[in-house]
């Protein structure tokens, strides 16, 4: 076998498990070795109980051997962002305040994954309460980018991005309120899918901002993202924000045929103030898609000029409301950056918040109009390369800017509008991945998955992976 089991994808492992060529225990042992070798460098995990994981693997092995194979996720080890509720297990949200929190019910996505036979292999590091984009966690330590451990992995789902990229989990789930799936996917060179708002239940996920939050897959391939979405998507009576619209069979719908697909490019917003190192890779990717038969069309989206205001006012207002009581009672148990943002969120007025919601309505209309003409919109995921851990500034075309001012510029519109968006690697710059974002119309995840899948076949990273050194014993 040319690579370890831990380095494989769901789509590679599932047929081998189904046929009995390997067992869940084999995959788990391979993962344990990766974690033993590299976790000390990356710090992707908050919790990893080997005995519990091995017991789950043995149970999955017995079920499969008894002929009770449940599908593509049965026996697959998945470590998840530590913000999803597991009944009777500690879930920290990356915080001190909730360091001993034990929910008495499972999140809906956890229930679905349990029914699918997943082997849960641990809880992953994250930005405290998901309120930030660097995963420099003051309580559990900074998570590091496997491509360069001096760099951030992005956030807030940084542990998920880093663990998938370092092959310390087969795949993961992240949450996304302003880009927290797509940002670490871009920084870590993996696939990150934010489904349409209402496509995946958020019941049992600690909120950051109620109206902006999403849950979605973080994977090594587009095919794996489609597989995971098949299992977690669907209406949930427990989550009033879910929408009762039939979901597709995303994995079966995957196709590399994108001839005639129309891809929209918005120059005025999505290619404004982008570092040239990022822009050249995304422009090259667009040319690749054109060579595959897609048509490129420039589009105008007037309301985008107000999207940063609408996103920021909405997220800081809702987040500060959620944490209001703890900010009064336990202010100094928050990390410095999160405490600052929560206090900042007390400043907007009701007028500010309601104006932001009017902008959201207009943006929704503008996007709906555009998606009558095009099948997808393409942009960079991030306008810069990941900065060093501890830095709050980024460089864009030799100019210095604040990290927080730029990090969600291109991802935030997907949250404000609730539209599906995926980040996929499109190249490397100085050894760090560059991500391309593909947005699509509401509840048409198959549109963006197919375009991403077609592009993925061009092998944009040329098979390169993070070059980690084994821990010295």
Image (tube, rainbow, N blue to C red):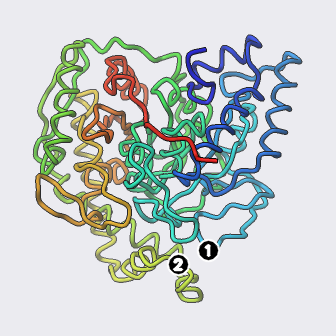
Question: Residue 131, relative to residue 227: is it above or below?
Answer: below
Question: Residue 355, relative to residue 2: is it above or below?
Answer: below
Picture disc at residue 371: none
Please identify the residue farthest to the front as the structure is shown. Answer: 473
Please identify the residue farthest to the bottom as the structure is shown. Answer: 329
The 10 Å Cα crowd at callout 2, few under 14, some 14 to 19, many 20 or more, is many
Q: Which residue is mark 1?
A: 96
Q: Are marks 1 and 2 in contact (CB under 8 Å)?
A: yes
306 sits to left or right of 98: left
> From mark 1 to mark 2, how far is it between C-alphas?
7 Å
Give whichever of 248, 224 is nearer the camera: 224
Picture quadrant where residue 442 is located? top left
Give whichever of 467, 72 is nearer the camera: 467
Q: Residue 199, how many percent across, how many down?
A: 51, 40
For image coordinates 48% across by 38% down, the residue present is 165
Picture quadrant where residue 152 is located? bottom left
Dot 1 falls on a residue whose secondary structure is loop
Question: Residue 234, relative to residue 399: is it above or below?
Answer: above
Quick one: quadrant of the N terminus?
top right
Q: Residue 371, how many percent across, how many down?
A: 26, 33
Q: Residue 13, how many percent across, how many down?
A: 63, 20
207 sits to left or right of 424: right
Give whichever of 427, 114 is nearer the camera: 427
Q: Which residue is mark 2?
A: 334
């Amino acid at each position: 076998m040319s690579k370890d089991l831990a380095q494989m994808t769901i789509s590679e492992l599932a047929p081998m498990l189904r046929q009995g060529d390997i067992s869940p225990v084999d995959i788990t042992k391979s993962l344990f070795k990766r974690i033993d070798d590299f976790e000390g460098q990356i710090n992707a995990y908050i919790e990893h109980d080997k005995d519990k994981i091995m017991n789950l693997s043995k149970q999955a092995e017995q079920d499969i051997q008894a002929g009770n194979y449940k599908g593509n996720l049965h026996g697959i080890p998945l470590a998840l962002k530590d913000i999803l509720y597991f009944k009777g297990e500690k879930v920290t949200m990356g915080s001190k305040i909730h360091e001993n929190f034990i929910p008495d019910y499972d999140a809906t996505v956890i229930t679905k994954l349990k029914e699918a036979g997943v082997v849960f292999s641990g809880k992953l590091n994250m930005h405290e309460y998901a309120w930030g984009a660097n995963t420099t966690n003051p309580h559990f330590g900074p998570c590091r980018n496997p491509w360069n451990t001096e760099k951030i992995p992005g956030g807030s789902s940084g542990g998920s991005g880093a663990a998938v990229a370092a092959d310390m989990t087969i795949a993961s789930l992240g949450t996304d309120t302003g880009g927290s799936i797509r940002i670490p996917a871009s920084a870590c060179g993996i696939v990150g899918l934010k489904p349409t708002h209402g496509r995946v239940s958020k019941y049992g996920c600690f909120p950051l901002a109620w109206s902006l939050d999403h849950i979605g897959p973080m994977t090594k391939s587009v095919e794996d993202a489609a597989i995971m979405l098949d299992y977690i998507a669907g209406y949930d009576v427990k989550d009033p924000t879910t929408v009762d619209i039939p979901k597709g069979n995303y994995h079966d719908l995957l196709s590399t045929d994108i001839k005639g697909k129309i891809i929209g490019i918005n120059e005025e917003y999505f290619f404004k103030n982008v570092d040239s190192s990022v822009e050249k890779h995304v422009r090259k990717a667009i040319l690749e898609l054109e060579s595959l038969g897609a048509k490129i069309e420039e589009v105008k989206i007037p309301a985008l000029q107000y999207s940063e205001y609408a996103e920021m006012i909405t997220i800081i207002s809702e987040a500060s409301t959620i944490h209001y009581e703890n900010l009064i009672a336990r202010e100094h148990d928050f990390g410095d950056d999160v405490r600052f943002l929560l206090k900042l969120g007390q400043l907007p007025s009701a007028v500010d918040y309601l104006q932001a919601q009017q902008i959201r309505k207009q943006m929704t209309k503008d996007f709906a109009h555009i998606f009558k003409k095009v099948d997808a919109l393409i942009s960079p995921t991030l306008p810069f390369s990941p900065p060093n851990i501890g830095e709050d500034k980024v460089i864009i075309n030799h100019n210095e800017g604040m990290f927080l001012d730029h990090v969600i510029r291109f991802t935030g519109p997907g949250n404000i509008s609730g539209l599906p968006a995926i980040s996929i690697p499109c190249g490397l710059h100085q050894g760090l991945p560059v991500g391309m974002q593909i947005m699509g119309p509401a509840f048409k995840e198959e549109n963006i998955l197919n375009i991403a899948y077609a592009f993925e076949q061009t092998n944009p990273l040329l098979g390169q992976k993070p070059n980690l050194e084994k821990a010295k014993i």
